[in-house]
Amino acid sequence: DGGITQSPKYLFRKEGQNVTLSCEQNLNHDAMYWYRQDPGQGLRLIYYSQIVNDFQKGDIAEGYSVSREKKESFPLTVTSAQKNPTAFYLCGSSMATGSVELFFGEGARLTVL
Amino acid sequence: AQSVAQPEDQVNVAEGNPLTVKCTYSVSGNPYLFWYVQYPNRGLQFLLKYITGDNLVKGSYGFEAEFNKSQTSFHLKKPSALVSDSALYFCAVRDLSRGGYQKVTFGIGTKLQVIP
């Protein structure tokens, strides 16, 4: 079955450590996205990528980094510069950035210890 | 700038009764509207979308939504609620009339509680 896989589902990080969230899709979608979800704030866009080897900052990119070396993969690194990283992170994809709905993975919950 | 408002943090409805989850939007051009549902600790599942055409859009699991351009609303509805419909619902909008990448803006979500 086609879909978006986020792994692991639960992550724990000590303060000062970087952590990488994996996102893989086999939908052959061109565009991929990372959103952060906090209670009462909805979804906020961190980064997006329209094609391989290209990505753009979203609304809350500070303290995060991404790469897009392959069409199917869009990993997100939460760096030590992100002061409040505890959240639920959602990876999404779509056929193109301008015209269709987004599909999402199951999400990953990051907790800072 | 585009925006989405979901005025109700929570909606309670008795099982078997009709339900409505409200959404209003603001875009400078033509809207592309979505509804998603999220169960606890899960990703968002796409329910339905409106691009153009019939103002009443039918989607998954018996849900439908009514687009009202004059009121800039896109309310989610279901004729008969099920306990399994209890979840968090997100409305989202994208402005299709502008070129280049146009991000999707999500509302803050409305928790639907269906009471047995």
Image: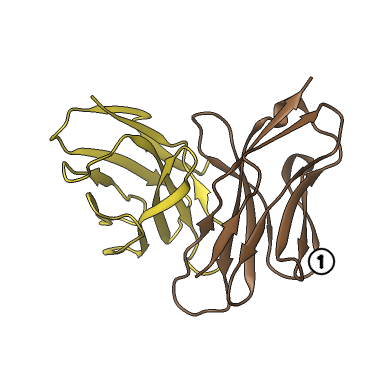
Chain colours: A yellow, B brown
Instruction: Identify the residue at horizontal 33%, vertical 55% (top origin).
Output: A60
Across and down, in percent, residue A79 comes to 18, 44
**How many residues crowd around disc 1 within 10 Å: few (fewer than 14), some, or many (20 or more)?**
few
Instruction: Identify the residue at horizontal 74%, vertical 27% (top origin).
Output: B114
Give the residue number, with chain letter if any, for mark 1: B54
Letter of the chain that mark 1 sits on in the rendering: B
Q: In this view, does B2 lie above or below B14?
A: below
Q: Can residue A87 be seen in this view?
A: yes
Q: Which of A81 and A5 is in front in this view?
A: A81
Across and down, in percent, residue A61 comes to 29, 55
Q: Is residue B113 above or below residue B101?
A: above
Q: Which of A71 and B58 is in front in this view?
A: B58
| The image quarter in which residue A107 lies | top left
Instruction: Identify the residue at horizontal 51%, vertical 33% (top origin).
Output: B42
Q: Which of A68 and B9 is in front in this view?
A: B9
Give the secondary structure at mark 1: loop
Across and down, in percent, residue A42 comes to 49, 46
| The image quarter in which residue A9 lies | top left
Q: In this view, does A79 lie above or below B70?
A: above
